[in-house]
Amino acid sequence: MKTVKIKDKEFGLFLPQQVIEEAIDTVAEKIKDDLSDSNPLFVSILNGSFMFASELMKRVNFPSELTFVKLSSYEGLGTTGDVKKVIGLTEDIKNRTIVIIEDIIDTGNTIDSVVKELQKEEPKEIKIATLLFKPKAMVKQVDLDYVALEIPNDFIVGYGLDYDGYGRNFPEIYKIKS
Ligand code: IMP
Ligand code: MG
């Protein structure tokens, strides 16, 4: 099996490029069926979703816009855990169909705080498109509209996802060796 080493960790091939891109084909078809007439604004969350966003948007052949945001973490006063804040969104999203493009939904905490923050600007609707979903890790109640691949609760890298900053460039996905 093909393996890669990043720093102290070994990873084995888990999802080849063809499997990933066929799953993106399927998601893109659903998005076309649902949103062709809604002039959506796709909001890609950097850094992790850059590769998924690129492949997805090549397949979105209807009028739409694409923008990129980052998330900054800060300690919420009086709350436990990190709250994520969206930075870099300059577009007016009021009454607009928004499609958030994420790399992975793990606990769901990140996407939950992003959705709540965007809701304040009164978009028409917010859809979520994620390349990967770990259903067993999810602790939040968030509807995921477009999931390319469901995966088990293992740490993975590649196709945008990193281990300590490395591995984002792999065109396939690798799983940590236990
Ligand atoms: P959540 O808030 O727990 O859903 O975490 C989402 C974020 O954690 C993702 O956007 C990733 O940046 C990171 N993450 C979760 N699981 C993995 C993984 O298996 N590999 C790399 N990053 C991950
Ligand atoms: Mg991410």
Image (tube, rainbow, N blue to C red):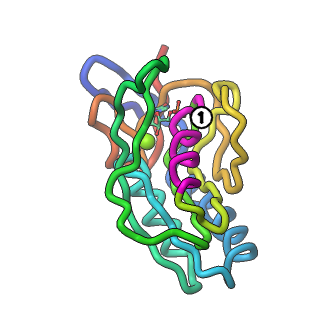
Residue 65 drawn at (x, y percent): 47, 77
**Main SS, magenta residues:** helix
Residue 45 drawn at (x, y percent): 42, 52
Q: Is residue 168 magenta?
A: no
Which residue, as the protein is rendered here, is positioned at the far top? 178
Q: Mark 1 — residue?
A: 108
User: Residue shown at 59%/29% (left/top)?
Assistant: 107
Mark 1 residue CB less than 8 A from any atom of ligand 1: yes
Q: What's drawn in magenta, residue-wise?
A: 107-120
Q: Nearer the viewer, residue 146 or 5?
A: 146
User: Residue shown at 52%/71% (left/top)?
Assistant: 41
What count of labels does the image hold? Answer: 1
Q: Which quadrant of the figure has residue 168?
A: top left
Residue 160, placed above or below residue 34: above
Residue 164 drawn at (x, y percent): 29, 29
Q: Residues within 10 Å of mark 1 (few under 14, many from 20)?
A: some
Q: Is residue 63 visible?
A: yes
User: Residue shown at 46%/35% (left/top)?
Assistant: 174
Residue 88 is left or right of residue 93, and the answer is left
Residue 143, placed above or below residue 43: above
Residue 146 is left or right of residue 101, and the answer is right
Residue 35 is left or right of residue 159, and the answer is right
- Amino acid identity at mark 1: Gly
Q: Is residue 118 magenta?
A: yes
Residue 100 drawn at (x, y percent): 54, 57
Disc 1 element: loop
Which residue, as the protein is rendered here, is positioned at the far front? 78
Q: Is residue 1 visible?
A: no
Residue 172 is left or right of residue 116, and the answer is left
Q: Nearer the viewer, residue 135 or 97?
A: 97
Q: Nearer the viewer, residue 1 or 162?
A: 162
Q: Which quadrant of the figure has residue 77?
A: top left
